[in-house]
Image (cartoon, rainbow, N blue to C red):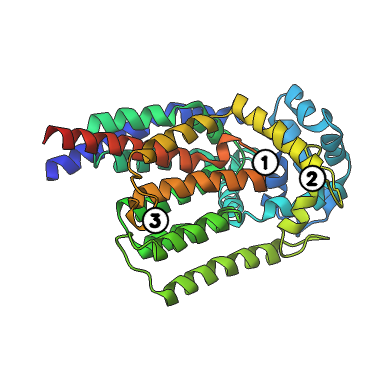
Amino acid sequence: MRVFKNKRLAGACLLVIGLLPMSRFAYNKLANNWDMLAYMALVMDVNVGNADSVHSYVYARFRESVPPETYTQLTATSPYRKLMATDPQAFYKQLPFYSVKPLYILFCKLCYAMGQTLTKATVIPSVITFILIGLLLYFWLSKYLKIWVAFIFSLLFMHCGFMLNSARLSSPDMLSAFFLLCSLYFTIEKPSVLGLFTFLLLSVFTRIDNLLFSICMITVCTFSGSWAKRISLFNYLAMTGLLVAAYFIITTISSRAAFGILYYPTFIHYFNSSYSYRETFSIKEYLTLLNAKLVAGFYSSSFLIFVLLGIMTTIHTVKSIRFQEIPFTSIICILVLLLSFVRFFMFPDLSDRFYLAYYALIFIVLLKRFVLNEMKNKQ
């Protein structure tokens, strides 16, 4: 047993070494998405200074850190980006969309306080959690696969384009994916009420739209009747209440200008590809946007592939339409698939960065089912 643990740890060390080159690439070759500018302002703490001084400082640091063509691309290639680059008040009014990710912003502030440049500080959380997700994937798979096989599969998965591209982004998505995947680990692999709730709560403080996933997960674990642990009704209500309270705490603290504590009722008015404020929008405009994002997502993301894989992992285990007879892991996979579509209809965007934890879960469950079926056939 001790030899196995030593080999497992050696495999983890080798995996970190294997991930370092791409981690370094992500650190040095930032994706330079526009969101970086908003997070840079929040790292500087826009409340300390006035909007004009923070705006000028952020854009000056950004100009120094990126090639001229990148600066032009993110400041002059659309009316929205031109407005953000020239109007400090308009830029300031966008910040509540980004300040509702406090855990990620705190992580960025720590990196900045430790001497990183303002631009690099916004991507380091993605780079670090890129490695952490790889390790979690490896330790999870090594329970069912030989160590060297788990190492290879983990290394290959982490080198997929959707993982590498997300590691280069100044966004909370990689950190969010890590917390969600940890919560799934403590749901499926090592059932723990405390572990499940802790990481779900951390995920909400990273991205408040994780609230829907968190409440659904706790509800399924409580009322499905097939989870290994038991959650009392009191604990269920307490955990749900704390998650909802976290949502309102975040939105209340982050509220600025015309943005209310509910956040999404205001956010919905920006529900168009031009990012301009609209008091109302028609169903036709929404369906047009939905169609455009769906086509773009199928063309440029891995979403459809993982939906098909997710269906493959569950369809042969669901032998009854009765909820109580469906295996718990299949229930979680079905929930993940349903929430993926719900999220898309609420916020039409199929970018891979929003679904990384779901991709990893389907990948793990598919390999786990394959191994268990092989062992069953040999008996």
Marks 3 and 1: which is nearer the front? 3
| Left or right of 119 in this view: 163 | left
Q: Considering the numbered disc 3 on the image, is that residue within a helix, a strand or a loop?
A: helix
Give me the residue at 18% from left, 40% from top.
Answer: 6
Q: Amino acid at mark 2?
A: Ile
Q: Position of residue 127 (x, y in %)?
A: 50, 38
Residue 302 higher or lower than 267, as above or below: above
Give me the residue at 41% from left, 42% from top.
Answer: 361
Decide: few, some or many residues near mark 3? Use Cα within 10 Å; few <14, some 14-19, many ≥20.
Answer: few
Marks 2 and 3: which is nearer the front? 3
Q: Quadrant of residue 169?
A: top right
Spatial CA span between label 3 and label 1: 29 Å
Residue that carries the numbered disc 2 in the rendered image: 283
Q: Amino acid at mark 3?
A: Phe
Spatial CA span between label 2 and label 3: 34 Å
Query: Relative to the observer, which residue lies in front, 187 or 18?
Result: 187
Query: Relative to the observer, which residue lies in front, 199 or 103?
Result: 199
| Left or right of 345 in this view: 232 | left
Q: Which mark is residue 323?
A: 3
Q: Which mark is residue 348?
A: 1
Q: Which mark is residue 127?
A: none
The mark total stands at 3
Q: Amino acid at mark 1?
A: Pro
Mark earlier in primary sequence (2, 3): 2
Residue 198 higher or lower than 345, as above or below: below
